[in-house]
Amino acid sequence: MKRLSTVGAAVIGTGFIGTVHVEALRRIGVQVHGVLGSSPERGAERAAALGVPKAYVSLEELLEDERVDVVHVTSPNHLHVPQASAIVAAGRHVVCEKPLALTAAESAALVEQAAAAGVVNAVNFNIRFYPLHQHVREIVARGDLGDVRFVTGHYFQDWLLLETDWNWRLEPDKGGALRAVGDIGSHWLDLMTFLTGEQIVSVMADMATFIPVREQPTGPVETFSTDRSSETVSRPMGTEDVASILIRFENGARGAVSVSQVSAGRKNSLQWEIDGSVAAAAWDSETPDHLWLGHRDRPNEVLMRNPALMTPAGQRAAALPGGHVEGFGDTFGALFRAVYADVVAETPAERPPYATFADGHDEMLVGDAVAESAAQGRWVDVARTPAPVPA
Ligand SMILES: NC(=O)c1ccc[n+]([C@@H]2O[C@H](COP(=O)([O-])OP(=O)(O)OC[C@H]3O[C@@H](n4cnc5c(N)ncnc54)[C@H](O)[C@@H]3O)[C@@H](O)[C@H]2O)c1
């Protein structure tokens, strides 16, 4: 059995989130041997900036590095499947960013491939790993809220509010056919499945594209950048700016979520509330160390994240004592600690707390149901029969 300090990693993609992966890996004590960028020049520039020893010139070169046990895929969405597939074929463990694939047929094939190879496989639904979310999952499972009845919330951002805002996510061949739902709605939907322990079985969705034409800069654009280019090309938009989704869960609970990338002032606002037959719970990503607990016959409570007051899973995910706020970046360390425990054990856990490729595939199936429902204007069941695996 390996020790954490001898496990090696490499990170594909050196943009917004690739940088967060590198920093979190170092923090948990994993050696990052190198990064792979979109070009050898970009990779070398980012490796130097991050203090990573090597910029691989190709995925082949990366996979020839015997010191690399785990590869993190943080490239744009359309590259996840080809890169993750090559990594698994080389017998390496893999942490892939969401969404796992562009289509459910692709993600189904990846699930099969990873299972056959026996490698640890994770999809980076990091929001599960706010310590209070690990805590909530356990208090819901032990019945503190009673039967889960009503699950509501939103995920709003504003960085695509203007027609001059541009990113590769706006190009369906790179980002996928769903945009706001695939990019951020998927986090909320995965989180609710995780917290309640209930699968989403049916959806009724309405989506809108308010900005039908956007101005694409002729040069590259960093994610979340507000720099404006003077040279642009007009591009028609097919993907959604907003979505409203009604949800039915397997236990009969009902839900509703609003998703938007055009809500002025909402930089990265995820909120949820779970109403049960005994009590309720609610959380807001802008105050991530606070959990609201609602009661009918006694005063409501606010639990400030504190390992001493949380369930075992909440304690495991917490890195700091209470009162020292943990945020977005910390969730990556907590998730990676869970993944790398399996890497050290050299086998995937049967029911790990992190999202696996199977969970990532399930999210693709929910997304397909959302797209179909919006197109047809009716309720659509999530088609859980495994999609056919391409020969
Ligand atoms: N879990 C989260 O909270 C979270 C947050 C942001 C993004 N993401 C996901 O992470 C992925 C990247 O998003 P981002 O916001 O960092 O985008 P980004 O554009 O900032 O970064 C993507 C990087 O990939 C690089 N790249 C492009 N082609 C490549 C190739 N062939 N090989 C290697 N690298 C290549 C680009 O140069 C860029 O540095 C997306 O799939 C996105 O959905 C997840």
Image (tube, rainbow, N blue to C red):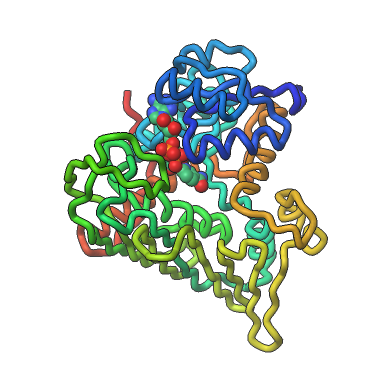
Say which residue appears at 38% left-offset and 61% top-offset. Answer: 259
Image quadrant occupied by the C terminus: top left
Image quadrant occupied by the N terminus: top right
Judge left or right: residue 156 versus residue 305.
left
Say which residue appears at 48% left-offset and 23% top-offset. Answer: 43
In what quadrant does ligand 1 lie? top left
Judge left or right: residue 289 versus residue 283.
right
Q: Nearer the viewer, residue 259 or 262?
A: 262
Q: Residue furthest bottom?
A: 297
Residue 289: x %, y % from top left:
67, 62
Q: Residue furthest right?
A: 308
Say which residue appears at 68% left-offset and 25% top-offset. Answer: 31
Among the 4 quarters of the image, the one containing residue 143: bottom right
Residue 247: x %, y % from top left:
40, 65
Q: Nearer the viewer, residue 372 or 336?
A: 336
In this rendering, does residue 82 appear at all? Answer: no
Judge left or right: residue 222 versus residue 380.
right
